[in-house]
Amino acid sequence: MDINQVVIPAAGLGTRFLPYTKSIPKEMLPLLNKPALAYIIEEGLAAQRTNFLIITNQSKQAIAHYFAESTELNSLLHAKNSGGFLGNLPQVIQQCRFTFINQNEPKGLGDAISLARGHIDTDYFCVCLPDDIITPEHAGLSQLITHAQQQQASVIAVQEVPRARVSSYGIIVPKKQVSTHLFELADVVEKPSVEQAPSNLAIVGRYVLSTTIFKALDEIRPCAQRELQLTDAISYLLKHTQEKVFAYKIQGSRYDIGTPIGWLQALLTLALENPEYAPSLREIILKYAQ
Ligand code: UTP
């Protein structure tokens, strides 16, 4: 099974992180010295994927700017012998192919993904949501691709969440447990009530999807907020086609950086795991813990 492209929807409003997101995309929130989106690209590279389709909009030029080669900056840094400050960014830019696709209006995650249709050249493709950061870095996507190739089917990432929190997530309805971490799905439901939740396995922002999802996105209707939901399209795939969909319980920790507290959690975790930052951060924390 060939899987080439990684679709990264990054055209949302970022309401939960306003007013910051009024001018700066949340996908460009700093996590140490790199934007969140850079971690997603590196996760793709770790899964041997180099072809990225980023769904963006006119007010998010900072994204394309970050991943463009800048000969002017390079020569300025070179003259000051400071090229190292760019870290691995020049290599990342060299290795990857970036295509930017415009979403005129934030009409939902499903709508954003549907815009990639004409660019996908294999039967399956990946989707990574840039506000879901998974550590250890690089862990997420490669696990899903392995299982999609084994099952020859779509696979979505899930993690257990406390039952009291199920109503904040898309939740899977397992049909059968295939192995310790792998489930075949009967359905998926968006934000069920605690009483009605079919499981506590919540969908995390990593997917390997069959291109049949585009037909499903054509068939479903927008939700009450007038947004096209990816969960509804996956549910359609399960109910109206012969295709199977699996869920894989990914290893690692996941942080939703779409809210200030989730971003802070991700930032502190990355800093505490990084030998360059950890000693100074520990000192600061100890000072306030006394
Ligand atoms: P989210 O729902 O987490 O992002 O979508 P959001 O809509 O920007 O955030 P809030 O709810 O207003 O705070 C997950 C990903 O899908 C993208 C977002 O940019 C985010 O990375 N997205 C969402 C789009 O590209 N287009 C959309 O219409 C909606």
Image (spheres, rainbow, N blue to C red):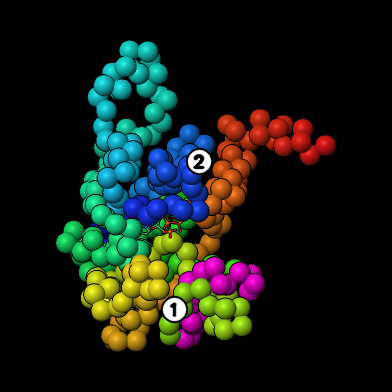
Query: Which circle's residue, 1 or 2, is located before the other in the chain?
Result: 2
Query: In the image, is 209 to the left or to the right of 15?
Result: left
Asked which secondary structure carries label 2, the reply is strand
Q: Is residue 258 above or below residue 166?
A: above
Q: Look at the image and say whether residue 207 sits in the magenta stretch.
A: no
Q: Which residues are magenta?
A: 162-179
Which quadrant would residue 199 be assigned to in this image? Answer: bottom right
Q: Which mark is residue 126?
A: none
The residue closer to the viewer here, 288 or 43, is 288
User: Which quadrant would the C terminus be assigned to in this image?
Assistant: top right
What amino acid is labelled 1 in the image?
A: Val
Residue 163: x %, y % from top left: 63, 74
Which residue is at the front of the view, 115 or 104? 104
C-alpha separation, residue under disc 1 versus residue under disc 2: 31 Å
Give the quarter of the image for residue 72: top left
Q: Which residue is mark 2?
A: 31
At 51% from the left edge and 69% from the top edge, which residue is drawn? 169
Residue beneath disc 1 = 188
Label tally: 2
